[in-house]
Image (cartoon, grey):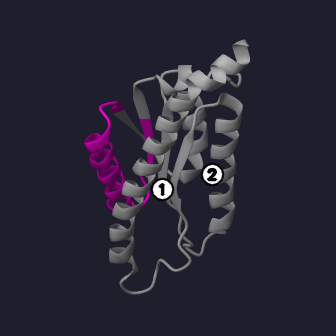
Amino acid sequence: MTQFDPKISDIASRNKIALVQACWHRDIVDEFRHSFIKTWGESDNSQVEVFEVPGAFEIPLRIKQLASTDEYAGIVATALVVDGGIYRHEFVATAVIDGLMQVQLETGVPVFSGVLTPHDFLSEGRHAFFKEHFVLKGHEVASACLATLTKKDATAGCLNQKAGS
């Protein structure tokens, strides 16, 4: 099992980002992926590797597997969890977000969430709204990822010097 790695510089210096995407509502979630990759590419030359899973519930395990490879500076998750009337979507959303947090706390690899749970998805016009909203969220998560990894890289030397003092 991968243990938490306090050597921030080791993680921040990795030159790949993983993006894990659920396939439910693919036409909407694809908008996040395209926006993330575009924004990332304009600001960083690190490679983005895309992985697909059937649904949101499968994301935390796949992210844990990827974090355990020690290849990624950060991992991004994206999915759309909607209330389809069959089960409580809050259960799925909570399980996914809790899983993402657990992975980053256990491994030290930053995990970024683009997993959205709309209050109202089935009303008229909501499908188009969420397609546009996922474009915005892809951009926002890419910006957050860049800011976090840049700050980690910039502070790594300072933190590692203190640890060695």
From the viewer's perspective, is 124 left or right of 69?
left
Rendered image quadrant of residue 124: bottom left
> Which residue has dot 1 on it?
79
Magenta-highlighted stretch: main secondary structure?
A: helix
Q: Is residue 6 magenta?
A: no
Mark 2 and mark 1 in contact? Answer it, CB < 8 Å: yes
In the rendered image, residue 137, in percent from the top left (x then y), is placed at 42, 60
Task: Using the image, determine if residue 152 lies above or below residue 31.
Answer: above
In the rendered image, residue 33, in percent from the top left (x then y), is placed at 35, 50
> Which residue has dot 2 on it?
96
Q: Secondary structure at mark 2?
A: helix
Label 2 to label 1: alpha-carbon separation: 10 Å
From the viewer's perspective, is 102 left or right of 36?
right
Q: Which quarter of the rendered picture does the N terminus lie within?
A: top right
At x 68%, y 53%, the residue is: 95
What range of the chain is rendered magenta?
Answer: 18-47
The mark tally for this picture is: 2
